[in-house]
Image (cartoon, coloured by chain):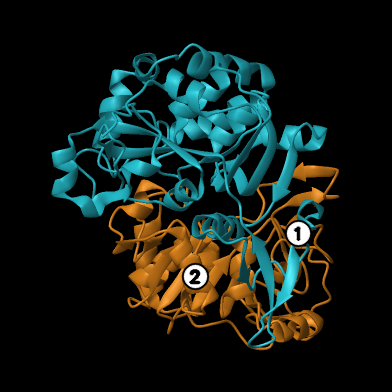
Chain colours: A orange, B cyan
Amino acid sequence: MKIDFREYSPNQRIAIIAASELVGYKSCFVGIGIPSDAACLAKLSVEPELNLIYESGAIGALPLSKSYSTGSPSIAHGADMITDSLSVFSDLQAGRIDVGLLSAAQIDIFGNLNSTVIGDYDDPKIRMVGSGGAHDIACLIPNLIILMPHDPRRFVDSVDFATSPGSGRDIKKIRDQLNLAEGPSILITDKAKFIMSDEGWLLHSILDNFTFAEATEGLPWSLKPPITGPIETDPAIISALEQINY
Amino acid sequence: MIDKTSTSQDAIRNNVNAGDTIFIGGFGHLIPFHLSHELIRQKILDLTICRSGADILFDQLIASEIVKKVIFGYVGNPTVGLSHSFSRAYKKKSVEIEEWTNQSIIMRLHAARMGVSFIPSKILQIGDKPSNIDYLKQIKCPYTDQKFSAIPSLKPDIAIIHAQLADKYGNIQMWGIDGDTIEGALASDKIIVSVEKIISNSKIKESPEKTVIPSHRVSNIIELPWGAYPSYVSGHYSRDDNHYIEYDTISRDEDKLSSYLKNWVHDARNIEAYKKLIGNTKIKELEQGLCGVKNEN
């Protein structure tokens, strides 16, 4: 279905595209915020088999009201199972969880993510929250999708601190040596989808009704025109959108 | 069997020493606010506080200048923003830190619980590693030659946690989101627990599968209903998200934070005073909320 993406908020646009990417997966490691919204949207529409797994230990959750913490009542309420964090991180390390969604304050061309400091580690301009489970997910999840609002300040040549490791030729070589997962393979912004290559992110496609100039505006990376035309969106995703509209 | 019921004042005074390493329980759920506030009221200094994901209770302990070191995977006000007192202390270098990740903190506690000095893991081998955990070593598996991080054990002197129920002997019953709470408690040398309600041992025996920590590991039990506010307790009350949102504004300003700490910590010496601050309207509202008294699942 061709949709006018301009009718939707930036976060909704990211959730719509991310939900399409979750088709075929059975288990998804999610954090709070846009990742959680996107996974809920997929579960409610195109991938009913998807089990949402939160690091707090909640499995099979479907939070339909706003969640502030991964341990919030809306995550616990209606979950199929509540275990402990050690169990879900163990499943993650064993490769038993299919796909993960992450966001961060900064991202670079190789998909390194920063949620630790803006500026120097020992003398930062902004001291942020730290990794949480993000580093762990970025090392271990077999399929990693990054979700980032298109805010040019967040897109950099090189992150100030690589909290969560990226991919690309050099990092992938080290990942292979250490028997780690491949790292980020897809980046979704509110204007475009990118895929990882040896040289870093390639522009894959642009959301319907947005231009190349808009999709790349302010991004410090040199990007070629998209590989394909706009992605088809299943109308079921759009229909389910109102259920997570909180 | 020994009756281990106590007051917050006596439990903290008799179990915590200056310089101790304290695991603080609660992963969004069951955060032991009121019992931990007693550390501030008794001004027990030079503490090392640790857990995986920490929220505004850590901010309050740091703001109160009783913390020497923070060992963590995350410190913030989830979704709302940063831990402003932590950020200020970090920049002023008035606290020492050891910055891990949530998984590595949990594995550190698990190693201590298992009585081993490290656990191998795939994480923390790539990406930027904070200089304060530079001592982390890499090892080679003797069977496969695969390289792993040797995640060192972390054995706290004491755990402070909150749970739903206990008997007077210290059998702890807890359900809902656990996160790293039970792991951290069982990793620690001593455990003190505030609970919503103390029940009889015969009631405990009706559902022993709900008991997550046995009495012989517990030093003291304190009945503190609403002691986990503004976090929540499944089956009792929901989370006060607005309190967390307002705390963001308050904690940005050190003067406003001082008066907050005076009201909610220093002057709220007992749980009755704490409940009075929460107020009856809010109490009724949160009891009806998600995971509250009648809306548990």
Label 1 is found on which chain of the structure?
A
Measured as percent of width and height from the top left, residue A46 is found at 37, 78
Camera-side residue of B115 and B261: B115
Numbered-mark total: 2
Q: Residue at x 35, y 66 (%)?
A: A240
Query: Mark on residue A90?
Result: 2
In the rendered image, is residue B260 in sight?
A: no
The reply, left or right, for residue B188 in relation to residue A123 is left
Viewer-closest of A13 and B155:
B155
Residue A194 image-quadrant placement: bottom right
- Kindly identify which residue carries mark 1: A152
Residues B23 and A43: in front is B23
Residue B132 position in % (x across, y down) = 78, 51
Q: Is residue A222 visible?
A: yes
Q: Please state which of the two labelled residues, at mark 1 or mark 2, is closer to the viewer.
A: 2
x, y percentage for residue A164? 69, 65
Dot 1 or dot 2: first in sequence order is: 2
In this rendering, the answer to whether A176 lies above or below A108 is below
Up the image or down, B154 lies above or below B63; here it is: below
Q: Seen from this angle, which residue lies furthest top?
A: B267
Residue type of the residue flagged with mark 1: Pro
Location of residue A166 (image quadrant)? bottom right
SS type, badge 1:
helix
Q: Quadrant of residue A132?
A: bottom right
Left or right, B42 with reference to A212 = left
